[in-house]
Amino acid sequence: MSDVLARLAELQRADLPTHGGRTLAYVYDSGLAEVDRVGREAVAAFAATNGLDPTAFPSTLLMENEVVGSTADLLDAPATCVGTVTSGGTESVLLAVQGARDSRPDLVEAGVRPRLVVPSTIHAAFHKAAHYFGLDLVVVPVGADFRADVAATRAAVEADPGRTVLVAVSAPSYAHGVVDPVTEVAAIAAEHGIRCHVDACIGGWVLPYAARLGRDVPPWSFAVDGVTSISVDLHKYAYTPKGASVLLHRTPELRRAQLFACADWPGYTMLNSTLQSTKSGGPLAGAWAVLRSIGDAGYLDLTRQVLDGVDRLVAGIEALPALRVVAPPDSTLVAVATDDTCDVFTLVDELGLVGWLAQPQMRYGDQPATLHLSLSAATAPLVDELLDALATAVATAVARGPVAVDPAVVEFVEALDPGALGDDDFDGLLAAVGMEAGADGPALPERMAEVNALLDLASPALREALLGAFLDRLARPTRA
């Protein structure tokens, strides 16, 4: 057994660090070692429990109701509010969309595709939900401030209000870190009897404390009339172990279509509140334990720390040559653009080489590629180090100049049909960028700037096809 654990430790050495504050995406670190220990032990203690049947495991129902209650209190929810703990933000979004669709059986039974109206900055989970559940996704533009365009949203809703089942906005948007005009959009939805969902997965546990700290936070919670549901992830800025998000509905009636029951088979009657049936009680227990370990005063202090870090980071970036903050952040997310002298993908590589993981965001429409930074409380004490690393990376990127993609490779990519991408096409592209597939799949180069620059040139449809093919090559069974 010790050999198995040793092998796990060996495998984990190739992973990005989940603590230490230098991983600026995917993980959120409170910097509190004792809280992390409590969370891990709670997950382990309840890993074998099954949230499928709360009558068999009443502890899961008690913990879920208390976690939902704490979340409802934080988000200005009325006494009628109900909620569900899910596995993450995507599941919360999927359920919000599914529930809105199924609240209109008249459309479904008539074979009419419901509509979902969202700004272009909405999280990709809404695209996934529309794809899975057969909705028409109506994407409206954002303004120069990267917030949803209210007039465009009204026009989109009023183009077919009878088919529109949900309007969604972000608090804040992932790509740019700004809160949409929730008050105005929710009013449009309410005027037409349409649900309005606020995706606060990444900001919902920060913005209430930011307001208490005296920061200027646009209205976004249940305090806004017309908001019918909100999603907020606990495994982000509540700093709980992975696998915990909350979906809140203003009333039980609004949640009812989310619930699924099936008695029309010879087994037990299935009753689910989420997409999952069997689900470990571990993530729920971890979330419950961490919420109580940190407490309200603790979260206020963690929010003060991370937002002070954001302030120092933004000021430092604005003082660096070739960089600019795309939009003043409303929360903990910072998007950084470069001028023509500095390549954003080289910045990502250079930061990675000195231990900082930053995310590249590809161009979208007329918006250039950007550098995405998600700060956590553990990052705040390291902001000066991050700024030093950024300054060095900028100097290197400027000295190297723009990444040059081989014109022959560009021509090859431009000739590809996203709908008919074959194995030979993909193999040819891998070879062209030095990522020939071996026994363990395509090998990633140490520097990804050229690969990212190539993806940046591709259309979104082609980018999706290429990355889907890449994932397919990576996810192949290891056979004895």
Image (spheres, rainbow, N blue to C red):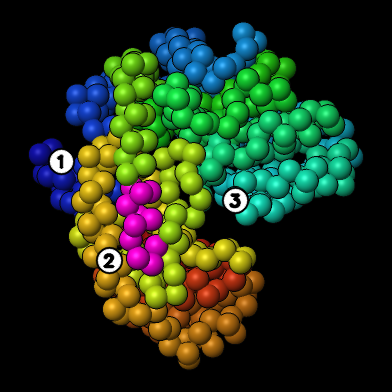
Q: In the displayed structure, would residue 22 be above or below residue 271? A: below
Residue 321 in magenta stretch:
yes
Instruction: Assess whether mark 2 and mark 1 are in contact (beta carbons under 8 angstroms).
Output: no
Q: Earlier in the sequence, mark 3 or mark 2?
A: 3
Give the magenta-colored segment's residue range. Answer: 313-323
The answer to whether residue 244 is magenta is no
Q: Which amino acid does label 3 sit on?
A: Phe
**On the rendered image, what quadrant is the N terminus found in?**
top left
Q: In this view, does 297 lie to the left or right of 122?
A: left
341 to 319, vertically: above or below = below
Q: Quadrant of residue 288?
A: top left
Residue pictured at 61% horizontal, 66% vertical: 366
Q: Which of marks 1 and 3 is nearer the N terminus?
A: 1
Badge nearest the viewer, 1 or 3: 3
Q: Tell me which amino acid carries mark 1.
A: Leu
Left or right, 252 with respect to 290, comes to right
Residue 209 drawn above or below residue 473:
above
Relative to the observer, which residue lies in front, 221 or 230? 221
Residue 228 point in image, percent of width and height: 68, 25
Is residue 305 depicted above or below 129 in this figure? Answer: above
Pointer 3 and pointer 2: residues touching (CB < 8 Å)? no
Q: Name the residue under label 3.
A: 146
| SS for callout 3 | loop
Amino acid at the residue labelled 2: Ala
- Give the Cα separation between the discs numbered 1 and 3: 47 Å
Dot 3: within a 10 Å radius of its alpha carbon, few (fewer than 14), some, or many (20 or more) residues? Answer: many
Query: Label 3 near label 1: C-beta < 8 Å?
Result: no
Which residue is the site of mark 2?
393
